[in-house]
Image (tube, rainbow, N blue to C red):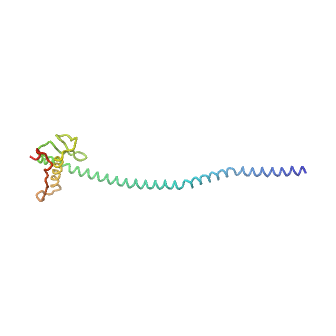
Amino acid sequence: MTLGLVNAWVGTLNAAIKQHNETFAQFTQRQDEARLALRRHHLADKSQEFQNACDAVSEAKTDVDARTLSYNQLQEQATDLRSRIKEHGQAAEKINRLIEAYLGHKELSIASVEKGYEIHRRGRPIDSSPSEGEKTAIALCYFLSRLEAEGRSIKDRILVVDDPISSLDSRALN
C-alpha cells in the first residue's frame, strides 16, 4: 500500500511537472498574446482620438492650401499694382507742374519711388499728413494728368469739377 501511495504521488507530481513544463513552453507565446491584446485595447481606445487628429490635419492642409492660393493671388495683385505704379511714376513731373500751377508754389511735390509715390515738402518726405487742401490739389492734379494717358486727347473730353478749391487756404486760392 505504501508503494501504491508513492506511485500515486509520483504520478501526481509528474502530472504537475508536465503541466508546468507545458505552461513554461507557452509562456513567451502567452506574453506576446497579452501584449498584442493590450495594444489592440489601446488602439481601440484611442482610435476616435486618432481619427479626429487625422481629420484636423486634413482640414489644416485644406486651409493652408486655400490660404496659399489666396496669398499667391495677393502677391500677383501686388506685383501688378507695383508695375502699374511704375508706369504712373513717369507722370510725377507732370503732376508736380500741375500742383505748382494749382497751388502757386513749389513747396509741395510728388516723387516717384520704388514702391509708388512719396509726397515731399521742400524736397524732403513729409512727416505728417498733408492738409485737406493739399490732398485735394494732389488728387485733382493726378486726375488731370491721367486725362491724357494712353494717347487720349484732352480736347475730346468734357470735364465737370465741383468746387475743387473749397478746401484751399487763402494763399493757394489766390
Residue 77 horizontal side relative to residue 61, left or right: left
User: Relative to the observer, which residue lies in front, 133 or 38?
Assistant: 133
Q: Position of residue 97 (x, y in %)?
A: 13, 47
In which quarter of the view is residue 152 placed?
bottom left
Q: Of all residues shown, which one is farthest toward the right?
A: 1
Q: Identify the residue at image location x=69%, y=50%.
A: 27
Q: Position of residue 91 (x, y in %)?
A: 17, 49
Q: Position of residue 167 (x, y in %)?
A: 15, 48
- Total numbered labels: 0
Q: Position of residue 85 (x, y in %)?
A: 23, 50
Residue 85 horizontal side relative to residue 41, left or right: left
Q: Of all residues shown, which one is farthest toward the left?
A: 174
User: Relative to the observer, which residue lies in front, 127 or 65?
Assistant: 127
Q: Identify the residue at image location x=91%, y=51%.
A: 1
Residue 166 horizontal side relative to residue 113, left or right: left
Q: Identify the residue at image location x=12%, y=48%.
A: 102
